[in-house]
Amino acid sequence: MSLFTSSSKFKESAKPLVLFLTVQAIACTLVLLVPWTGAGWFQDLIVEQVDGDSRDVVIMGDSKVFPFVDGRIDCPFFEQPAYAFAWDSSTVLYHRILYDRLIHETSLRPRVVFYSLGANNFAEEGLHVQRDYAIRFVARPKDLIGYTGMKGSLPFLADAFFSRLYPIYGRRIEITHLMFRGYKMREIDLSPPERDLIADQNYLLIYQRGFFSNYKVSEFHMENLKRFSEEVRASGAELILLDLPVTQEMRDLEKEFAQEWDDRIQRFSEDNQVRYLDLRDHPEMLFRDINHLSNISAKEVSERWLQPLVDEGLGQ
């Protein structure tokens, strides 16, 4: 076989690989150039809108906070002007980064910060933790350095490194889940909600299989919660951890599969002197679906339980 023939065969066999690498390079370039309207964009938007308009009260968290939102970031359910920062499927990493940006890049100096959390946000093998997009593209270099040495941080740091090396991987949650949804303006509707029973049942199955199967609390996320509480305290605010009401079906699921969360968050509250308000056992509330309050019940939660804590925190 001649050298020329061998070279030709090699070129032919290499064509699929070259084509694959070319397509991947083009795709990664496009991913880097796309004007994303996802989680990172939302943080930029908040920083821009909040600067120059400081408020005493902030409530932040994942989609459970959406019922408290009017417009993009306003919350009308407190006697004082308040902000509500909600982003879908977010964990404590996302909100810790957001709060740090708000304190260092804006004039916002809240005095009471409610952080809505739950067993799903801290499930080590759950969807929110496994696909935690905060560390993949929202986290800044200083955040990644700060994670070094935290218990359980190594897999997340490796994930962050590979996400930056291969942007399609880092943005995959936005591409498959969040990219085209944008962030719609929200309107408060105080009429009783209509529930979709089939959707509720599917939702319950997703939680059972995607969050509470082999439930174990993520040590990395608990350490971030501890540091978040310290940073909020250092900024002059009181952090109040908030487990919002859920339906009886969801509560039964948590009790059956995620009892470890109840034990850990209570111990965290005591060890770190952070107030924890557990409102999950209030199935009498009106819900939009099996896991989210309606606007009218978000208003009731604010007036009945949260406002007295705000008054206490503000010395009123």
Image: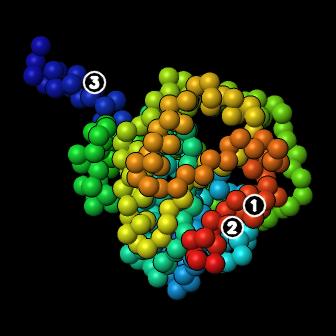
State how far apart marks 2 and 3 are (Cα). Answer: 69 Å
The C terminus lies in quadrant: bottom right
Q: Residues within 10 Å of mark 1 (few under 14, many from 20)?
A: few
Give the left or right position of residue 227, taking residue 78 as reference: left
| Tag 2 residue | 307
Q: Nearer the viewer, mark 2 or mark 3?
A: 2
Q: Which mark is residue 304?
A: 1
State how far apart marks 1 and 2 are (Cα). Answer: 7 Å
The N terminus lies in quadrant: top left
Q: Residues within 10 Å of mark 2 (few under 14, many from 20)?
A: some
Give the left or right position of residue 221, taking residue 39 as reference: left
Instruction: Name the residue located 84 percent from the left edge and 33 percent from the top edge.
Output: 197
| Tag 3 residue | 13
Residue found at the very far left of the displayed protein? 3
Is 8 above or below relative to 84?
above
Sequence order check, earlier mark of 2 and 3 = 3
Is 90 above or below relative to 56?
above
Is 126 above or below relative to 110?
above
- Pointers 1 and 2 in contact (CB under 8 A)? yes
Give the left or right position of residue 191, taking residue 77 as reference: right
